[in-house]
Image (cartoon, grey):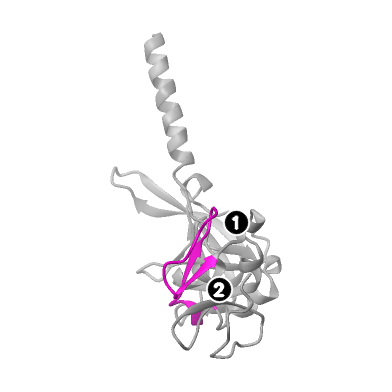
Amino acid sequence: MNSCFVTLAILFVWRVEEMAEACSCSPAHPQQAFCSSDVVIRAKVVGEEEVDAGNDIYGNPIKRIKYNIKQIKMFKGPTQDIDAIYTAPSSAVCGVTLETNGKKEYLITGKLEADGTMHVTLCDFIEPWEDMSATQQKSLTQRYETGCDCKITRCTSIPCMINSPTECLWTDWVIEKVYNGEQAKHFACIKRNDDSCAWYRGSAPPKKDFLDIEDP
């Protein structure tokens, strides 16, 4: 009996650890999130419901949370408006929790499925609009897109370096111990006219031959 109990306890702990590790995401600069996403929108969430999303390979029903949204602006995505987004039912499997009173505006990035529906996870960049810097908000219209051919390399410890002139070194973590630091809030990695990439700060459009003198 004790042996059976120990076995069950081990299985339970293993399952809890598995669920805890099921959602693991690498931090992404807002520009990376923009470039890697199929859809980038500004929206309010006006409703929530649990819906069926078919069955898994064992025949068990798959549940999803459907957030009904009011799209305010699309920065990247299909021609038609997005009126709902879908996510997993819990954070253990990367599900996203959003306020549904229709008062808070969000920037939401996500993937577009073959059926035209938008799906989001904890690994996507989802931020209250009011928490974003003015530079981040303005960069969504053109700035980030001009740097999608560049690579942002995250620096997690010193020393760190780039391996190509098309890379920008993201140092927020080693300098500020946060990922939403100065580079994330105020800089974009932009391709220059010589095809190299460099950090650019400011809301004014950069000149094609701008020099990388504002590196943080």
Per the rendered image, the range of residues in magenta is 144-169
Residue 65, above or below 60: below
When asked about the image quadrant of residue 181, the answer is bottom right
**Tag 2: Cα neighbours inside 10 Å, few (<14), some, or many (≥20)?**
many
Residue 173 got which mark?
Answer: 1
Quadrant housing the N terminus: top left
Depth check: 146 or 161 in front? 161
- Mark 1 vs mark 2, foreground winner is 1
Q: Give the prevailing secondary structure in the magenta stretch.
A: loop
Quadrant of the image occupied by residue 185: bottom right
Which labelled disc corresponds to residue 41? 2
Horizontal and vertical percent for residue 100?
64, 60
Q: In the orientation shown, which residue stands out farthest toward the left? A: 57
Q: Nearer the viewer, residue 151 or 158?
A: 158
Q: Residue 78 carries which label?
A: none
Circle 2: residue type: Ile
Rendered location of residue 50, percent (x, y)? 50, 53
- Where residue 5 appears, as percent x and y from the top left, is 42, 15
Q: Does the magenta stretch include residue 162?
A: yes
